[in-house]
Amino acid sequence: MHNYQNCRPKLLVIGDLMIDHYLWGKTERISPEAPVPVIDVKNESEVLGGAGNVVNNLVALGAEVEVASVIGADENGERLRRMLDELGVGQEALIVEEGRSTTRKSRVIASHQQVIRFDSETRTPIDPQSEEKLLERVKVLLERGIDTVLISDYGKGVLTDSLTQGIIHLARERGIRVMVDPKGTDYSKYRGATAITPNKKEAGEATGIVITDEASLREAGFRLKEELELERAIVTLSEEGMAIFGDSMQVIPTVAREVYDVTGAGDTVIATLGFVRACGGEIDEAARIANAAAAVVVGKLGSATASWEEIIAFEDALHESTTEFRIQDRETLAKTVERLRSEGKRIVFTNGCFDLLHLGHVKYLEKAKSFGDVLIVGLNSDDSVRRLKGETRPVNPEYDRAYLLAALEAVDYVSIFDEDTPLELIRIVRPDILVKGGDYRGKEVVGREIAGELRLVDFVEGRSSSGIIRKINDKGE
């Protein structure tokens, strides 16, 4: 991954700002006054919501952020300004309109479930004077230098048709990218933007196409791109990733994880897409990273953000879940062991040829894994096996043997060694527990002095690679 942690792009977020207010508690009884749960509120919190959640996500990624919006001359408006101040967000294009209510959404959360939401807001379009002021200030910001404009439409009246078109025109005139998270079913006001990011349901409603399969998704995506004169239409597909429509359709898959709350996932997607593109990343890489960021936030409760540390950890976890990753050379294994020790893991090591993997091998490895948290297997290379067992062995080449071992649930990592003994590998791993077969009772065990403890495990009687080879040869004769 490109080192985006050191990138500091300047982005302008335009849209409906609001405050997300949360009341956290638990419920254990029903009210005697009415058949409703009684929530025992333990604490409450407030965060920026709507377009403000896009701001939150950009700040978490390390961007420099300017915001453009219209709020009310009220207490919630003042509170919202203070929240932006605390984040270090520029407010030069934040307009106050008399008689308008700043949006505040209050959610009651009991036992990790949202029970009810109540809103205080104005949803009518902003007045023409506010629109004119906002457009003038956006123009000044664009002329000073903005890398990317993000339009976050929550349908609360800030993004009128004329204002949205005016912003897109000003940005495109200056060669500045405009990315839109749309609202409603009429997307005509977004015409000429660089990209829009509706979810599958929204894309279907906007095009009148019921998206049920790849063909209908393709039709809807390209219709959006062509009718709105976009460079790209990007349709988010929840746990399936996202589809990008440019010259062709490209689906960037993701990996599903446990979902606690989808609140704000779309904000995270457009913020991450905009950040990565502003830093020079290609669209497919931006989409992949945005998928990972969204997966992080849906695993949290309430409007949430994803830091680079969390995104990288999520992608590393996906990478580490692959069989190929678990086959490691010594340099990589040394780093892996260092990380495992920092996490307090109890490391188990064993070794062998594991030619023609069979039941005895699997049971032996399962028993070895039971002694600790992580099992690392040292595997004799082909040359090492030949020196130990003769020119006819191994039957399976080293990579095949390593892959089969790494695919076993009991095995965490496999490393191939070329020496006659695994001593050098054991010095790298410094296992808490060294496991050998029961046939080593009373014998000297290589690396015993390095390991914290030695455990001997008996093999399953009548199961061996040599026995299988003899049976095959006997049948061949």
Image (spheres, rainbow, N blue to C red):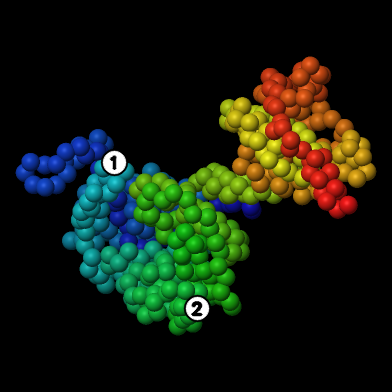
Residue at 58% over, 27% down: 344
Local packing at callout 2 (Cα closer than 10 Å; few below 14, some 14-19, many 20+) is few
Residue at 56% over, 74% down: 249
Query: Does residue 14 appear in the picture of this structure?
Result: yes
Please tell me whether residue 13 is drawn above or below residue 367 in the rendered image. Answer: below
Query: Does residue 145 appear in the picture of this structure?
Result: no
Residue 383, image x and y in percent? 89, 41
Q: Which mark is residue 215?
A: 2
Residue 151 in the figure: left or right of residue 409: left
Are the residues flagged by discs 1 and 2 in contact, CB closer than 8 Å?
A: no
Residue closer to the observer: 165 or 54: 54
Residue 306, image x and y in percent? 47, 48
Secondary structure of residue under mark 1: loop
Decide which of tag 1 and tag 2 comes sooner along the chain: 1
Amino acid type of the residue that numbered disc 2 sits on in the rendered structure: Ala
Please tell me whether residue 107 is drawn above or below residue 70 in the rendered image. Answer: above
| Res. 134 image quadrant | bottom left
Residue closer to the observer: 285 or 40: 40
Residue at 32% over, 64% down: 154
Residue closer to the observer: 314 or 325: 325
Amino acid type of the residue that numbered disc 1 sits on in the rendered structure: Ser
| Outermost residue toward the bottom in this view | 227
Please tell me whether residue 36 is drawn above or below residue 199 in the rendered image. Answer: above
Gap between marks 1 and 2, in whole Å? 41 Å
Residue 160, image x and y in percent? 31, 72
Residue 176 in the figure: left or right of residue 201: right
Q: Which residue is disc 1 drawn over?
A: 111
Residue at 7% over, 41% down: 32
Residue 339 in the figure: left or right of residue 199: right
Secondary structure of residue under mark 2: helix
Residue closer to the observer: 351 or 117: 351
| Res. 420 image quadrant | top right
